[in-house]
Amino acid sequence: MTTITGTRPISREALIDFVYHEARLLDEGRYDEWLSLWLPEGIYWMPLDWQQSDPDLVTSLLHEDQFMLRLRIERLKGARTFSQKPKSRCHHVLNRPFVDEFDPEAGRFVTTTNMHYVETRLDDQFLLAVTARHELRLVDGQLRIQLKRVDILNCDAAFGNIQLLP
């Protein structure tokens, strides 16, 4: 039987809990714990165009592998990152995630979550309406992120700097 912790069967509810947990780690600035959710080959992708299908041949807002994600996190945590004094904060407001694919035998799962993402620093605050797609794999009894795709509803708008990760 496929499990998450080695003792408990994988369930749709466990996938939904995983998505909520990931958002909470980001909201609380627990970035090292957040990075531990990723597979080594994991990709964080934020397309630039509506319904973009190719991250390699079309420019994206973000298309980061583990090296780039770690670099981003180190910058956010860095003592000499003066653009982050005081630090940016974020808040994810999630709708209940949909479980789009559920294949415990293959250890492959896909969720889609609509959410509002708020980022703030000093007097600046902005809101994004996004849809996040998580492609998850079960590895050694633990769910891991293989791909997180974040589509911004108004992706064709001009944006300032997005410091954190929706």
Image (tube, rainbow, N blue to C red):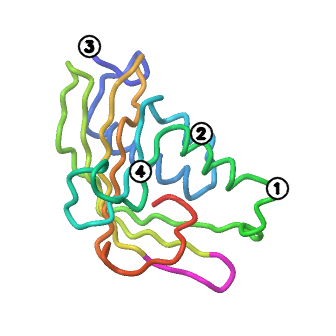
Horizontal and vertical percent position of residue 60:
36, 59
Query: Which dot marks residue 63?
Result: 4
Q: Residue at x 52, y 53 (%)?
A: 24
Snapshot quadrant of residue 47: bottom left
Amino acid type, mark 1: Ala
Q: Counting residues from the N terminus, which is met first, the one under dot 2 or under dot 3?
A: 3
Report the quarter where the N terminus lies. top left
Q: Which residues are magenta?
A: 121-127
Q: Is residue 59 above or below residue 160?
A: above
Q: Nearer the viewer, residue 4 or 32?
A: 32
Residue 124 is one of the magenta-drawn residues = yes
Q: Residue furthest right?
A: 79
Q: Main secondary structure of the magenta part?
A: strand
Q: Is residue 113 above or below residue 50?
A: above
Snapshot quadrant of residue 145: top left
Label 1: which residue?
79
Label 2: which residue?
33
Q: Counting residues from the N terminus, which is met first, the one under dot 4 or under dot 2?
A: 2
Label 3: which residue?
1
Amino acid type, mark 4: His
Q: Counting residues from the N terminus, which is met first, the one under dot 4 or under dot 1?
A: 4
Q: Counting residues from the N terminus, which is met first, the one under dot 1 or under dot 3?
A: 3
CA–CA distance in space, label 4 to label 1 = 25 Å
User: Mark 1 or 3, which is nearer the eye?
Assistant: 1
What is the count of numbered marks?
Answer: 4
User: Mark 4 or 2, which is nearer the eye?
Assistant: 4
User: Mark 4 or 1, which is nearer the eye?
Assistant: 4
CA–CA distance in space, label 4 to label 2 = 20 Å
Circles 2 and 3: CB atoms closer than 8 Å? no
Residue 115 is one of the magenta-drawn residues = no
